Image (cartoon, grey):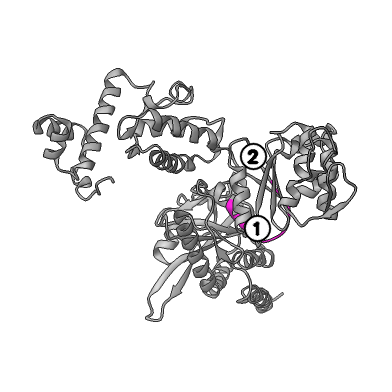
Amino acid sequence: MSITGQSDKAENIYLSTLNEILDSIAPHNDLEPSLNAILKVLAKDLHFERAFLAIMDPKSERLKLSITHSPAKIDHVTYSPGKGVVGRVYETGKSVIIPRMSDNSDFLNKAFGRSDEELKSLSFICVPIIKTSANNEKDVLGTISVDSPIQPMDNLLEHTQFLEVIAALISNQVLRLQEEMALQAQMLSQGSFPGGGAEVPPPANFVATSKSIRQVLRQARQVGPSRATALLRGESGTGKELLAEAIHACSPRREKPLVKLNCAALPSELVESELFGHQKGAFTGAYQNKRGLFEVANNGTLFLDEIGELSMDAQAKVLRAIQEKEIQRVGSEQPITVDVRLICATHQPLEKLLREGKFREDLFYRVNVFPIFIPALRERREDILPLAEQFLESFSSEYDKNIKRISSPAIDLFTQYHWPGNVRELKNCLERAVLICEEEVIRTYHLPPTLQTAESTATDTSLSFGEAVAKFEQELLVDSLKKARGNMLQAARDLRVSYRIVNYKVKKYNIDVKKYAGARKSK
C-alpha cells in the first residue's frame, strides 16, 4: 500500500472514531458513563492498551484519576501538578509523548502497576484538557492519557493531535464533572445527602470522609429512589442501621414509616408474631389481635437487621410477603395485602448459610438484589477522627461538659487502634471519655485500657519518660497559645509560669507563635 493509502486509512479511522465519540457526548447523556464510553472507543478503534482521564480536584488541588476504561490497580491515585508526566502536562498545558515508557525517568507508573515488559513495549501520550473562557483565558481542567503500542514517532504525533481534538470536544463535559466533584465534596462536608431529586440530610452520625464510605453513600443514593431490596453487609457496629435510614430518607417513601426489627433480638418463636402479627387466641398469651411490622410498615420501609437469624419458617413467610405482597397473621388464614419496601442487613456470610442449608436460596436471591458492603472502621481510617470529634461534640453537649478537643496523643491511639467493634465501639469510647474527663481536652488517660495497651499502638509506649513529658508539655503550651491567640504573656499567666519560661519553651519546641495569632477563641 502507498503512503497516500496509509494516510487515507488513518484518516478514515479518525473520522469513524470521531463520529462514535460525538454520539457519546450528547447533552442528555450522563457525564461519567459518556466519558467512559469515549475512552472505550479510543482504546478500541486506535488500539490503545489503556486510556484514562485525570481531573483536577478543586478541593485537594491535585489531579485525581477519575475515569478509566481499564481497571486501576490502586483505587485512589492522585498526581501533583508539575510532578511526573501527567503533572507536567497539567502545569504546562502542553502535550507530552513518551516513545518508550521504560526510557523516561519522569514516568511514575502510579495507577496501573505496569510490568517491566509493558514499560518496554508501550508508548505514553498525555494531552491537556483546556477550557477557554469568553475573555480568552485558558484553564487546564485535567489530562487525557493513553498507553499505546510502540510506533513510529509520526504515528504518535498523529495520535497526539487527534487526542488534542478530543480533549477540546470534551472540555465542557469535564468542566461539569469537575463542578460535580466540588459540589459533592461541599455536600459531604456540610452533611447534605441528595437523593430522589431532592437534598435530604443523612443520619446525624454518618460521617463520610473516606473514599470507601463515599462510595457506600453513592450506592445508597442509587438504590434509594427505587423499590429494590437492598442487602447491607458488614461487621457489627459499622452503621448498617444508619445506612438503612439514609436509603429510606432518599426514597419516595420518606414520609412513610421506617420500621426496624433486629431478628437476633427475639426468640425465633416470637419473630413471626412480631413480623406478621397474630389473631386473638392464636397461642397462649395472645389476648388480642396484633398488627405485625409488615402491616405497620405498609407503604413505607421495613428494615430487617440480622436477617440470617430468621428461622426457615419465617424465611418462607418473608419470601411470600416479597413475592405476593401478602401476609397472614399467626392463627389466621385471611391474607392481608401489604406494600413494603424491604431493606435487610447481616454480618454473617449468607453464602455459607446457603451451603449449610440454614438460609433459603430463593430468599437469598430476592434480598440480594442490591448488595452494599460497608467497610470496617479499620479499613477507613480517614473517618475515625471526624467521627470521634462528632461524638465528642454530641456527648459534651449531652452531659454539659466544656470539652473542646482531643489531644494529639489520644488521636494517635484512635487512628492506630484496630476497632473490632467499629463505629459503635468508637462511640462508646468517646462517651466514657467525656464522662470521666474533668479537663477541656480528652487525653490518653481518659481512654479505655484496651486502647492504651493495644499492640497496634506505639505512640506512648515507644517514648521514653523524658520524651513523653516533653510531648505533654508541648501540647499544653500549644493549647495555651491557641487560647491566648498567640499572646505569650497571656499564655504564661494561664499556665502560671513566667514569660521567660514560655519564651524558652517556644524556642525549644520550635513553635510558630504567629500561627496562633488569628486563632478563634474556643466557645
Residue plotted at (19% across, 46% down): 514
Mark 2 nearby-residue class (10 Å; few <14, some 14–19, many ≥20): some
Check residue 367 for magenta coloring: no
**Mark 2 highlights which residue?**
234
* Residue extent of the magenta highlight: 217-231
Relative to 345, is 316 on the left or the right?
A: right
Residue furthest out toward the top: 465
Q: Is residue 169 above or below residue 286?
A: below
Relative to 409, is 22 on the left or the right?
A: right
Query: Residue 494 placed where, x, y %?
Result: 17, 34
Residue plotted at (48% across, 30% down): 417
Query: Residue 192 placed where, x, y %?
Result: 50, 58
**Mark 1 highlights which residue?**
256
Mark 1 nearby-residue class (10 Å; few <14, some 14–19, many ≥20): some
Q: Is residue 243 above or below residue 9?
A: above
The span from disc 1 to disc 2 (Cα, nearest Å) is: 27 Å
